[in-house]
Image (cartoon, rainbow, N blue to C red):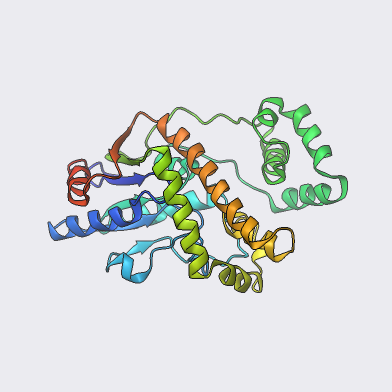
Amino acid sequence: MSPEHGLLSLIGPTASGKTRLAVDVALALRAGGRPAEVVNTDSMLVYRGMDIGTAKPTEAERRGVPHHLIDVLDVTQTASVADFQTMARAAVDDCHRRGVLPVLVGGSALYVRAVLDDLDFPGTDPAVRERLEDELATEGLDVLRERLVRLAPEAAARIEPGNARRIVRALEVVELTGGFTAELPEPRYARPGTVQVGLQLDRAEMDARIERRVDQMWADGLVAEVRALEAVGLREGRTASRALGYRQVLEHLAGECTEEDARQRTVAGTRRFARKQLGWFRRDPRITWLDALAPPQQLLDAVLALVPER
């Protein structure tokens, strides 16, 4: 990859305005003669039909700017971080081949690092995974967790005891590679000319925005959206069914909680997720942080000043 291509990544907590800013940046660059397109790095925007609960930008909100990695999978398909890395890097490469600056936006810290950094993920084996999942169903999570504690105690200590998906994945990696590490390597960009910009909000403002966004999702028909997706296999989707909002509404539709409980759980879960992700991002000294509440033109100018040169 030639350094003159460059790459811009916009990150920030839920409801910080990064999606709108990404489009503003792309339009401003295009107006100045530099082609730019948006590459989604949110793992849930890849799913068709998951629109309201993911705050997926509408065609109107995209304002004519091409967006990559949106609506590319059915909810029954699984997209691991390794799969996502492959798809996102292919989109970035496509932009570079055409002389276009990729503007990456969204995503959890792990997914963003998977795209930006020099990271390799262990492969998967469907037969091994299926056997482990069968053991999970027949023997129970405690048995698998005890096995992981015995085989890879450090990894087990970093995985929540009730997180069956991660425990199964860790055991799969141990079996395929002979070991497992829960530590990520020191960050190192995979491509020269990479720039990361973060939008920051104080906690009170972030929490308020998250609650307003969840309220708007309910008003826009999230429950009906989940019900429709349930009919086409959402519950069977290992990745999609765990998305914030969707998981809670599925619990409501199964009679496990009231609709109001599902809404409150979505607010609480989103706040926890946002704080956790911000904690990850703040440990990365390569990110330039900007005030999300700055006037829009001031914010846009600040980002444009950081865009990598051709």
Q: Residue 19 appears in which quarter of the rendering?
A: bottom left
In x, y percent, where is residue 255?
74, 63
Is residue 147 positioned above or below 168 on the image?
above
- Residue 241 percent coordinates (x, y): 63, 59
Total number of numbered labels? Answer: 0
Q: Residue 85 in the image: x percent, y percent?
A: 48, 49
Does 178 sit above or below residue 98? above
Q: Nearer the viewer, residue 74 or 211?
A: 211
Choose between 16 and 214: the one closer to the eye: 214
Q: Residue furthest right?
A: 138
Q: Residue at (41%, 32%) from the top-left corner?
A: 282
Image quarter in which the N terminus is found:
top left
> Residue at the location (50% across, 52% down)?
84
> From the viewer's perspective, is residue 56 above or below residue 133?
below
Q: Residue placed at 81% from the left, 52% from the top? A: 134
Image position of 282 (left or right of 193): right
Q: Nearer the viewer, residue 105 or 128?
A: 105
Residue 66 image point, x, y percent? 31, 65
Query: Residue pushed farthest left?
Result: 32
Question: Does the rendering let one see residue 241?
Answer: no
Q: Residue at x 59, y 53 (%)?
A: 264
Q: Which residue is nearer to you in this view: 299 or 114? A: 299
Q: Is residue 26 visible?
A: yes
Instruction: Report whether 287 appears left or right of 305.
Output: right
* Left or right: where 172 falls relative to 1: right
Answer with the quarter of the image where residue 199 lies. Answer: top left
